[in-house]
Amino acid sequence: MLNKNKVRLMTRLALYEEGRGRRDRRTDNYFKTDYISRQLLITFLSWTLCFVLFVGVYMVYELEMLMLEVYTLDLKELLTPFVGWYLAGLAVMLLITLVVYWRRFDRSYKALGQYDRALQRLLAAYGGKDRAHK
Amino acid sequence: MTTLMEIREVIRRIYRDYGRYVLPAVRFVVFFIAASLLDSRLGYSGVLSSFAVRALLALVAAAVPTNAGCCLLMLVMLYDLRSLGMVALIIGAVVVLTLFLLYFRFSPETGILALLMPISFTLGIPYAIPVAAGLLCGPGGIFSIAAGTAVYYFLHFIRDNEAAIRQFGVEEAIAGVRFMVDGLLADKVVIVMCVTFALTLLVVWGIRRLEIAQSFLIAAVAGAIIQLIALFVGNIVYDTGVSIPGALLGTLVALVVALVIVFFFYNLDYQRTEKTQFEDDDYYYYVKAVPKLSVRERSRTVRRINTAREPMRRRAGARHEGGRYADLRYDESRYDDRDDDARYEEARYRDEPVYEEADYTGVVSYEDETMGMTDEMVPDTAELESVRVPETDVMSTQDMEELPPESEDDPYYGE
């Protein structure tokens, strides 16, 4: 005879495994600090790349001026605003990354805990650990 | 109102039953509209001009995650821009790469908003999206909305300056880049729009989470008002040229959309609000529960008075638990509202064999309250005796041996 609760439980488990479960299990491979620092590093790289792109466009934009005044330019004066923008943008991006991935880790940790408990309930419905081994 | 609620229940049932088909279908339609929009805005390469190609693209995009689908559309956009000229491609690539690195990197769950934003701009109802997102999503939606707005205005700029951009060949690339960067940065309307939408979303989201009656409606109205004010101010300060009648009309549409959303998702009955307090070891809880308004869908009910009798199996257990030796007519286990898991747990703890719930359809007395049965219709005791299952059926001898000795603590010991 079908046990409705068991079927319901197994369906929910299967849905979770196929959906969010996959991402959660990847998250579970890391300690929280490792996970977040890894994401911070990726953000650092992508923001840097992005900024290089912006600077590239700016250089193309100002190419004539740069070509004409290349010998008389005060490099320090030219670069200071860029460094400022870079650091400010980096700070904002890192902050966003921190918030987003902190919450994401907490959420998947919680979801995996629930998943684990549901699995144990399922095991109990099959007669528990001891019976399964007999 | 009741009719509306019934319609709502029907729609909900359809969604519940066919959700697995409805959702992909909606995604397909959204991606198809987006592809058509891309074709009508750009369409320089003509790759999307055929219906079949657009349908295929939408099909693929609907099958992969939303953000991946968006990326696919972006690549098609770059291919299109290449036909317009090198300069357009370069600037387009910078825009797309920026989005990849700063937005898609977080693969937000609200990615569909980034797609809906340009579509709603084309339909003239962009003001509805931030209000709806504030009601349904969290503040994370801001980034998706900003990305969608930026892409829309980028496409808009390309289309408006199509002839000029086409003139720039490889030799005039620098002049072309200057022209496009100047044009894109001079247009303050993108920034005004993004700030307006972000503000609206935050206001709606903030108010709808407040613990006040009708918070969802208040949030929607407040968001719409804030949105109008922000647009006016932006118009005055930056001379964005946003049409005021259009904004008013769009805000009205936003309110209608918000009403529909509230009706479907947050239809609460504040009259029946209940408050309760309790505590555990660590906390004191103040709980306010607002029931949702709902009606039962009209349906035919089939009453079964008497069906084929099946052999009855009783759970093992003491009499007061409705076990094998309990009086059938006062069987409390019929009213046992614990779920199967709890019963399994308990039986396991007692180390008793567990059986599925018996099918009691033959014994009509238990349906007294619901089916209007009288005592006369209850089978007499002799009949009930005859349907009892022989003991060996219920418990194997091996299980009997495993039973722990009865304890004197059992109030029914020896009975």
Image: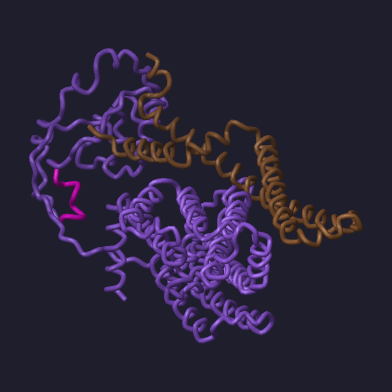
Front residue of this view, candidates B271 and B230: B230
Taking the image as shown, residue B96 lies to the left or right of residue B265, namely: right
Q: Position of residue A42 (x, y in %)?
A: 67, 41
The chain painted brown is: A
Q: Is residue B2 visible?
A: yes
- Rendered shade, chain B: purple
Q: Quadrant of the N terminus of chain B?
A: bottom left
Q: Overall secondary structure of the magenta stretch?
A: helix
Q: Quadrant of the C terminus of chain B?
A: top left
Quarter-of-image position of residue B123 = bottom left
Front residue of this view, candidates A6 and B303: A6
- Outermost residue on the front side: it is B171
Q: Is residue B408 magenta?
A: no
Residue shown at the point (37%, 17%) measured from the top left: B405
Front residue of this view, candidates A122 and B172: B172
Total marks drawn? 0
Residue shown at the point (22%, 23%) measured from the top left: B394
> In the picture shown, does residue A19 fall above or below B388?
below
Residue shown at the point (42%, 62%) measured from the top left: B39
Q: Is residue B285 visible?
A: no
Front residue of this view, candidates B383 and A88: A88
Q: Is residue B365 magenta?
A: yes
- Outermost residue on the bottom side: it is B245
> In the picture shown, does residue B360 fall above or below B177?
above
Quarter-of-image position of residue B363 = top left
Q: Position of residue B302 (x, y in %)?
A: 13, 55
Q: In this picture, which residue range is highlighted in magenta?
A: B363-371
Q: Position of residue B186 (x, y in %)?
A: 67, 72
Residue shown at the point (42%, 18%) measured from the top left: A130
Q: Position of residue B3 (x, y in %)?
A: 27, 73
